[in-house]
Image (cartoon, coloured by chain):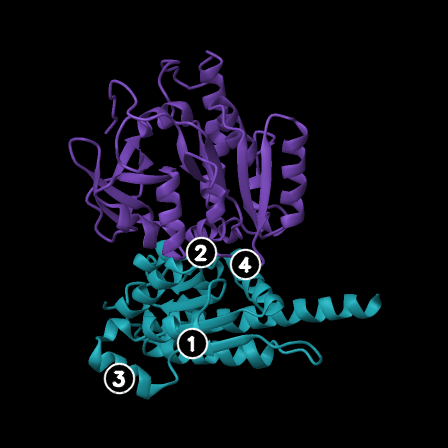
Chain colours: A cyan, B purple
Amino acid sequence: MAGSICRSAKSYFGLLNGLLPAIDTRRLEDFARVLYEALQTGRQVFVFGNGGSALTASHHVCEFVKTAAVSGHDRLRAYSLVESIGLATAVGNDLGYSETFSYPLEAYAKPGDVAVAISGSGNSPNVLRACEWARANGLTVIALTGFAGGELKDLADIHINVPCDNFGLIEDIHLAIGHAVSQILRTRVMEETAAFTAH
Amino acid sequence: MTQDLDSPTRSAGKVKVLVLAAGLGIRLYPLTETTPKCLVPIAGRPLLDYWFDRFAEGGLREIRVNTHHLAGRMRAYIERMNETGDFDVSETFEPHLLGSAGTVHANRDFADDADHCLIVYADIFSDVDLSEFLRVHCSHSDPFTMVLFRAHDPRKCGIAELDGEGRVVAFEEKPRNPRSNLANGGVYAVTADAYREMADMNRFDIGYHVLPAFVGRMRGWEWHGYHQDVGCLEALRQVREDVSVLFAKRSGVCACSPPCSSTEMVR
């Protein structure tokens, strides 16, 4: 899917600035709430996407596991599905690229776990395939999308959309969402720890 | 397609109801952080109350409800229903969510003393006529009957195709290219044998994993009344808006503007 291109830095940052109020921050709170529940119940969180979104997936995992960590408290069991180039290329080569995320998800995930799908277009076949499997097998699906959300929006329990056709801006905001959610999560864990200590 | 067969080919006998009510209700956050999804208030009453109204209308007394999220609240509700004396409600607690088919698997013995079981998704607001549904279920020889409704967005539903006898000849869960809008209503009537067959499949989700196995020996019955999934905040808002009109029509007073026929069902 082709997206728009900015011709100047001023234009790019102007658009980025204009987009931020369009993000439904209540859904970010919901996203953090799901991660908090996963943390409390020992559920796993799997993050995945293609290209820039693959790197965002790894970045999110870094934030969820490291930034959100609170000393003396369990840490979130979050994993990126894009880290194993061997597995991804084996599945892609032998079974088809559309299976690259669903295949490891089937191996690792259990009902109650969380799938975080990142797709600017919302239509990446391998992301959709993984989310279809996730829905059919009792995972909570969180989707980060751009454009109008694509088919992915219909597969998500929590859908956070960046209403924009510029992939750079979409991916920038997806990354910011990971930072924001990890900080909300950390704050919540700290509050819980403080409340426990006070008792 | 509505079936209207002349007479039942089998007696309904003893019918028990399994209510699937354990979901986390993530699409209803933050409401469901403190309230179970099936207890969210609609016109001042918990959603599940309306299902118990349907059960009472259908003469259904033996109910089992699965619980997980905010199970204490659910337990209190179940106790209250039992105190009415109108129902015999039992709870099946799931420390980990089992999925709709997994709940049937875990409660295989529920059908032991039943002739038929109804399986109901609690997060639906419906005025479905369960007596008529059971009559239809008993009027054919297939072991499985599902309520169908016309969906606004069939891509979010399980979509059925029927033959001329109302038999489901194709079923696809959340199709990308739906061939119709005749959707799974989340209410099933099954014989006790079919219930045990579902249980023995030991799968997770009825829509994805179980229903395809019943294609060709399952009937669909379209409900033309009100039937709305309360799965997200937008849908809940819509139901809350619709319900006053629905109740007004039932009492013979039309609240529509402009007024419409009080016998016409609201969709």
Q: Are marks 3 and 4 on the same chain?
A: yes
Nearer-N-terminus badge (4/1): 4
Q: Residue furthest top?
A: B252
Residue assigned mark 4: A30
Please name the residue shown 24% across and 21% down the image: B5
Between the residue at mark 2 and the residue at mark 1, the CA separation in whole angstroms equals 18 Å
Instruction: Please give left or right for residue A75 compared with residue A90 in the image.
Output: right
Q: Are marks 2 and 4 on the same chain?
A: yes
Say what secondary structure mark 4 lies in.
Answer: helix
Residue assigned mark 2: A157
State the image coordinates of residue B215 (x, y, percent, origin top left). Answer: 24, 45
Image disc number at residue A57: 1
Report the front residue among A6 and A184: A184
- Label 3 is found on which chain of the structure? A
Report the front residue among A114 and A189: A114
Name the residue type under label 1. Ala
Between the residue at mark 4 and the residue at mark 1, the CA separation in whole angstroms equals 18 Å
